[in-house]
Amino acid sequence: MADKRVSRLITAKGPGYEITAEAIAEVRAVLPAGFRLYRGTDLGMSASRALAEPFNAIPVLPDRARYRGEPIAVLVGPSWAEVDYLTDEVPQSPGEPPDPESNPFWHDSGSTSADSDARHGAPSEVPAKASLVAKDVGEAGDTRDAAAVAAPDTLDPSAQTDTERNGETEPTDTTGVTPHVAEGTYATALQLHIADEALWARAETVRKGAHVTLPTQWPAVVRSSVARVLKVNARSVALEAQPTAGSRDAALWMPAYLAVVATAVARIEKTTVTVALRGDQRYLTGGRSPAKIVWSSRLDGEGVLMTNRVTIDVDLGAYPSLTEETGRRVRRALGSIYQVPELEYAISQYTSPALPMGAMEGVGTAQVAFAREVHYNRLAELAQEDPVLWRRRHLRDDWPVLHELLGSVADESDYHRRYAANELVRKRRIQLPRNSKALRGIGCAVAEQISGMTGDRELGAVTVRLDPGGNARLFCTLPTPTLRLITAWRQLVAQELSLEIESVTVDTSYNTDQYDSGPRLFSRGASVVPRAIQSVCQTIQKQRFREPLPIQVRRTIRTSRAARTPAHALRSAGAATVEAVLLPASMEIDIKSVTLSVYAGRILDRGSAEAELRRGIYQALNWTLYEAVQDPTDIGRYRTTFRGKPPRIRIVFGAAERRDGPTGIGELPFLTVPAALTSAVSQASGLYLDTLPVRPATLLQMLQEE
Amino acid sequence: MSSRGRPGVGRVSGGAPETPEVIVPQSLGEALQLLRHTTDRAVWAGGTWWLQQPEESRRDRQILAIHSVRELRRVVRTGHHVEIGSTVPAGRLLGAGRRFLPAVAVEAIHRVGPPPIRNIATLGGALAIPGTTLPVTAVLQLIDTSIELRRQGNSRWMPLGHFRDPTGVLRIDEGEIITRLRIPLRTWTHWMIHTYGQPFPGGGPSLTLLGAASMDKTGIDEFRFALLINGERQIRLRTAETDLVGKAVPLTERDRRMILGTLEDNLLFGSELDDLGRWRASNGLRGFLQKLQ
Amino acid sequence: MEVTFHYNGRQKTVQVVPDTPAHEYLSDAHGRRGTCGDGSCLQCTVLMGSRVTATCTLPAYRLQGAEIVDLSGLDGDPLYFDIRRAFEKIGITRCGEALQGLVFLAYQLLGENPLPGDEELREYSRHMTTRCVSRDEFERAVRLAGRIHKRKHRELPR
């Protein structure tokens, strides 16, 4: 269908910018026939929060921008070329940015002891004490400036009994064991999504509702949002969810945002209106939040971890979203796979006058996993122990998979020998000039991924119907799975019901009676949904020879039980080693190899799983080395792909038990590779690196300062 | 050709440009004649660079599109050099010229852009970007490329290195266009192109290190080294280049120190590069000298 | 100005502003897409003649008389079929609009050399900026497509 009326968002030139009433009147007077300019107020939106949960904090077309690049108006016209041309011509006036004191601030703190840890397995057991309070924040980068506090260089009690930390001296432990405190400040930069698919929505209002067409993986949010704008029941909104290739989930709120704008404009224009993001507006889909993490650990004289004290600040940008989900995941990432007798934590999610960030692969845990794993590599170094062996002393014993993964990744990459050899060279090099030749290092990391949402938003259903002819029909509420995923589901049903794959059909067309289970971001297509399919098929198998066909069984997809009973959570694990070479002549980092060992239950489609992990590895390498921008709106300079020499990648899949269902896999590279690479560069350079991205300029500066 | 004005353009912003008229000559004679009569026409070859500029910077009333001029799309090879028409797309040149162009030139042409750009972009266009020197231009300059500038009734050849004055302004007269590039077919036994950052307009800070040398039995026959800073400034070590000719390899420590000293003495080197840039440039030159064996 | 060109074999005449990017006039889908503006995102690529072209950096006046083909115009092309098959086998399944550009890159590369060497492949893959696929996956997929195509081509009766 051709686009009858098309429109583009007009974005603010800076915080506080607005299009004044006078400017609107002036522009409207000179706009050629067929063109219209609307602000949020003209569309009846800026006063209320138009988007549905969990994005209800994001206003649609506010009168005054809170951050540079925020949409503040929309221009409608007859063709894309003409609208594009005029979009940048609309005059804007600078004004005072909105009062920062009104910014919400999400805070959660707590502690766990060895007892509760042993019973439940995770700090996530602590009831969240989330609250919204006001906090004055400055520019986005303010809190990321704190310098790292150097950790003590030795654990030899005779050399240093107490460690000075931030000017305070730690008292001696009352148990008589001489404690040592190592503290690090870890910072990660934002990572923009930059989805490579077009983002658009086409809307037409009908008598008591609207008809909306758009590519989305989260149709329920779109429908609810459109319904809120039209003040009608969600059932009055007919939604045509277009197929997507998979990466559009990263757009999060943007499909709903565009749908709402298109609907509001269509209501006024009384015709079909299409709104689309321009290529240079793709930054609007947000990305991974920058975070600052201060990790302080107390160890005994044997190098055994006694206590962790962690402070986490996550910058959400101008508007918060998915804060509860991020908070839960961050809490879990703090220590769920390690045995730590005591943990104290304080998590803050604050807003700032910057582009709103949302969940990205890892959903908050990637930042924490980076800090944790780099910190633990540092602790192992202080204990003068191989980091893999140090980890194996500290990993939880009730999930042997973690030990197996670490063992297999170490064997596969010859970690122990290489680590020892590099350490030897590093220590000898202290007396030798650093730029003599290529400097080599190897790092490791281990992490856990939780699939599906941990909150109460994981909705959806799977229905399987077994017909008398031996044909099975699967109906799933996941709106737009890839063809490959559909094949994997069919295979699963065929296996479980002992059928030929040809006799299994899948229906995923979206309709208004369905629930919606959220975007692919939470790996539900390869984890939550197949689990439900397995469960449904097992029920059918039980009834199959007792009851007449057809048998139809439906299962609602429930919230991941990760938070309540970790032993049954949809969790997967990964361990990575990365070998890198620092070229002193140019300070470039050449990544030699990445070895990733993963456990993800039953692998539905090995080819897809491996492709997904490889893609993730490259993205993780890019995040570690390059991705950061001063101005997200300047996406022309933003580097989304790893352009270094491709490393040798080896992926080892851990063996799964027959009864193991599939779990997600896509986040594992983001949770492990950045820390492993940073540690590898630390070993190569002899510098303690704690900030992403690891930049050549920083390395040179640190070396020169030394 | 009919034209349609942009809707309301300028009335919003204050200016009053109109849709440009595009003239597409089929022969060089026709193009030069058109240029003679109206000298303020913008000349577009591939047009790729123009379209990446803000619209207000390309509001020309008339565009002379020379992509279809037959004479400008020829590649002629002789024993000593190859002459390339200024509107030969870089991608086509790679296909045809890979076998005989100097390897350093082939590598430089690869860096004109991704394949979808290379298939439209032209070398003539790359040379004529105002205020910006692309790595390909710097490399062609390094290997003694000359260009032909023509206007009606007149033609002149000029070394590419003289095409810009020290402030970056193109030395091209009214009514003139670049018609041919002449690349000497010399064998460069050693060469280096190393780019840090994105050396394109608006790409932020960048540094390109370029080196080319040819060796004979006795030592260095030819030596060239240049830095391209932020796609704007070039540093060429001409004195050192001359001094090194005839030296035996491996170079003595004194020779190396001499050429590195020349680099570090350069004013631009000190003022326009940060610590990392200077570190990379010095080490890049050192590494290139070490390769000359 | 008015330009007439062939789009997937069909003649099309449109009014264009000549010094604006051509992609906006090819179809509504192209206009909706927006673009990176420098050809790196591969979203607006088409085949012009037999060469892959970024239409965001192609001036609209150059559409005059051009033969433009997008993915739907390649239906039935044996090389295209083999490329799709190889992409599917390697697992390049997450690419949306960038897929068209990736296919065209492979198409041009394999059209010139069915068994490209590492250097040639790297020349194509090093400019990729999409997040949906890694460089070595793309290179593996192109190699595989080349092998499939070459094998089928050899097996054809003479």
Image (cartoon, coloured by chain):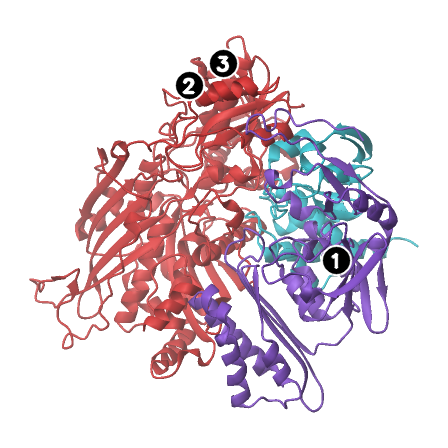
Chain colours: A red, B purple, C cyan
User: Can residue A498 be seen at all in this image of the molecule?
Assistant: no
Is residue A454 placed above or below A438 in the rendered structure?
Answer: above
Q: Which mark is residue C147?
A: 1
Is residue C97 placed above or below B284 in the rendered structure?
Answer: above
Identify the subunit bearing mark 1: C
Is residue B172 placed above or below B61 in the rendered structure?
Answer: below
User: x and y percent of residue B112 in the render?
Assistant: 66, 57
Question: Are dots 2 and 3 on a single chain?
Answer: yes
Amino acid beneath label 2: Thr
Image-based side of A165 in relation to A189, left or right: left
Q: Residues within 10 Å of mark 3 (few under 14, many from 20)?
A: some
Residue that numbered label 3 is attached to: A236
Is residue B69 placed above or below A680 in the rendered structure?
Answer: above
Q: Secondary structure at mark 2?
A: loop
Residue that numbered label 2 is attached to: A41
User: x and y percent of residue B118 in the render?
Assistant: 70, 53
Question: Are dots 1 and 2 on a single chain?
Answer: no
State how far apart marks 3 and 1 are (Cα). Answer: 52 Å
